[in-house]
Image (spheres, grey):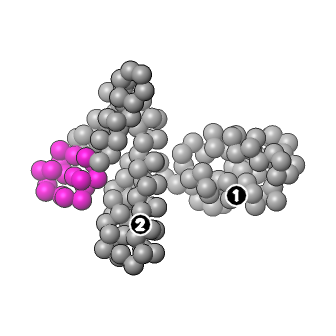
Amino acid sequence: MSDLKVKLRADLTTAMKARDELRTATLRMVLAAVSAEEVAGKEARELSDDEVQAVLRREAKKRREAAEAFGSAGRAEQAAREQAEGEVLAAYLPAQLEDADLAAIVADVITRTGASGMKDMGKVMGAANGAVAGRAEGSRVAAEVRRQLG
């Protein structure tokens, strides 16, 4: 079993003992998503730490989008709940890159790939996403690539 999944389960037990409803519900939701990912496909398999992190990133993104949707619909209570769940998930993810660091990585990738315009965006995005390795959301990376290529 992956170390991250073991940590999630241990933290769930701790949250249940502490009667922390938000943390308990969030960790149960994430572990359910991990379990669903493990049995998806032709045969069941054990997820690696990187795959568990990918599930965590996907769930955190869902929480951010839901919080924005609830906020724009005037449902502040639900938006706050989604934000709080997102903060619980963020504790298990690597720290996000600052804008300056992301700009430097993208500039380096553009130099290495020899990209000269928007026609090379796909090539730059592939290399840049590999370089940031989950430390920045794809939309942030794409915006920075567009800014530098455009």
Please tell me which of labels 1 and 2 falls first in the chain.
Answer: 2
Residue 7: percent from left, percent from top: 29, 39
The amino acid type found where label 2 is placed reads Ala
Q: What range is drawn magenta here?
A: 12-28
Residue 53: percent from left, percent from top: 43, 41
Count of residue discs: 2
Within the magenta stretch, is there residue 21?
Answer: yes
Name the secondary structure under disc 2: helix
Give the left or right position of residue 117, taking residue 15 as reference. right
**Pointer 2 local density, CA inside 10 Å: few below 14, some 14–19, many at least 20:** many
For this rendering, which residue is in front, 109 or 79?
Answer: 79
Within the magenta stretch, is there residue 150?
Answer: no
Residue 24: percent from left, percent from top: 22, 52
Instruction: Judge whether 46 appears above or below 135 on screen.
Output: above
Residue under label 1: 144
Residue at 43% across, 55% down: 62
Residue at 46% across, 61% down: 65
The amino acid type found where label 1 is placed reads Glu
Q: Main secondary structure of the magenta part?
A: helix
Residue under label 2: 67
Residue 119: percent from left, percent from top: 83, 48
Instruction: Judge whether 130 appears above or below 43 on screen.
Output: below
